[in-house]
Image (spheres, helix red, strand yellow):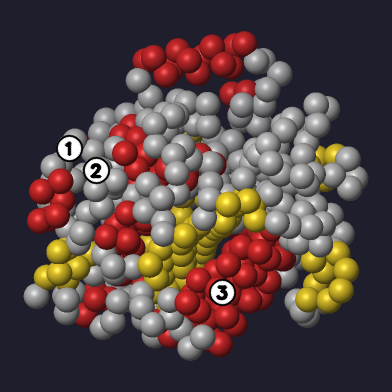
Amino acid sequence: MEIPVKLDEEFPIMALISRRAFITGASVTAGGAGFAAQRRPNIILIMADDLSARELGFYGHREHRTPNLDLLARTGVGFRTCWATPICSPSRAAIMTGRYAFRTGWFHNDLRGNTPLAREHLTIGQMMKNAGYATAITGKWQLPGSYDEYGFDEHFMWLEFSDQFTGPVEKENHQVPGRTARYWHPCMVRNGRLYPTTDRDYGPDLSLDFIADFAARHRRKLFFVYYPMVLPHGSWDFERNRMGHLPTPKLDPTGRRVPGKSEPTFRANVEYVDYQMGELVRILEKLDLRENTVLLFTADNGTAGYGKSRVDGERGPRVPLIANCPGLVKAIGASDELVDFSDFLPTLAELAGIRLPTGYVIDGKSFVPALQGQTDRGREWIFSVYAVHRFLRDKRWLLDGDGRFYDCGDRRDETGYMDVTESNAPEVRAARERFEQILARLPGPPDSLRRRWEELVRDQPNRRWRPRSRKAK
């Protein structure tokens, strides 16, 4: 038996398919393959802001204390190679639509469209809402258009600019004049109304409280929450009058919350991301929802100063991806299956038992089989793009955004890769030829945007468009 998915009148899908085709093509499969054959789960998708995979203990960091995320990875699946885009907005477009930049037009923060994606593409919020899920979003947006048209029933978001906000706002000598606080005394809007906060309120805590409330109110039905965090991104520190990482609520050496604030360090912010994940697990356990709620944790791009905006190697696009659900995801630990951000929409569809409409192009592939321990149904390659720079990788070979070609062997940690760009060895030539054939189907920006990019780089020579890239030296 198939239950048709309702398509809300205010969420038109792009002209590639008609409204009728979507209604007849997209359905909830009752008793079908995958997760729907058991019980459709709740899903919470968390995306940290500026966090390379290397920052977590599970991925090899020896100083950052991330016991909650490490445990989720060990008792679920921790993907060694997941790619976002090396800069934030295109990553958010890809995770929202399951489509690459040459379809959405989002190649860079400065090379992107202004039309809401929801008016031309199917979004994860629309898809989940139309499949009967209660939907919510909290955190940081960075997309054009309203939360409602993207398919979110409820929203509790940092409002970056507001004439009505009476709290801290950046001044003319700050990084972004007029921008509001996002951490302490944040500017938050809940379902269209400004939410009152004080200097004792910490934005990420308010978002977590919102998730707890939403889950409690919808515990008797299915729900989907998208949490694009503000953590651990740097921001203007109003107390110290500088740009950097702000203090978080203080944690003791065991990771427990104690009175006071932390030191204003990146490490403290990473560890508070981990603390929030531990609290989220405890919330689900208290509500008796843990066994049937899939947690997906990732990040929008690499860490600022290390990977963000970088096109050499895979430091820019490589981010963590951890999946956990005791009742549904096997305890596999580290996985070598390849994932990129176009894969999230089809993965959510398979988790929820949704059959996508025939004829509607999705660039990604579901990684649900990897959550079940299957290694014969994964992707052969993954793709990313930063402005005019394209990246491509399979399990052995890597083409970076600088055009350098690497033999990674079986390494996945961004180190020890062998630069074979100048090699004429037969297996290297064969791999390069195979990559060229794939890239022929994955174009970069059109000529008009390429010229725009060249103008931006030329007119702003002091701006660090591509930090520490070989070709930028």
**Label for residue 16?**
1
Image quarter where the N terminus lies is bottom left
- Residue 108 % position (x, y): 49, 31
Q: Quick one: label 3, few (<14), some, or many (20+) residues within 10 Å?
A: some
Q: Which class describes the residues within 10 Å of circle 2: few (<14), some (14-19), or many (20+)?
A: many
Residue lying farthest right? Answer: 240
Cα distance in 3D space between marks 1 and 2: 8 Å
- Residue 430 shows in the view: no
Residue 63 seen: yes
Q: Work out whether mark 2 precedes mark 3 in sequence or the reverse, and give the earlier one.
A: 2
Callout 3 amino acid? Ala
Secondary structure under the numbered disc 2 in the rendered image: loop
Q: Secondary structure at mark 1?
A: loop
Residue lying at 24% horizontally and 69% vertically, measured from the top left? 353
Ranked by sequence position, the earlier of labels 3 and 1 is 1
Label 3 to label 1, Cα distance in Å? 38 Å
Disc 2: which residue: 13
Residue drawn where x is 78% and y is 36% of the image: 170
**Depth order, front residue of 71/432:** 71
Which residue is found at the position 50% from the left and 79% from the top? Answer: 216
| Residue type at numbered disc 1 | Leu
Contact, mark 3 vs mark 1 (Cβ under 8 Å): no
Provide the residue designation for mark 3: 212
C-alpha distance separating marks 2 and 3: 31 Å
Say whether marks 1 and 2 touch (CB < 8 Å).
yes
Question: In the rendered image, which quarter is residue 178 located in?
Answer: top right
Badge 2 amino acid? Ile
Q: Which x, y percent locates residue 399?
A: 43, 38
Report x, y in % for residue 140. 58, 50
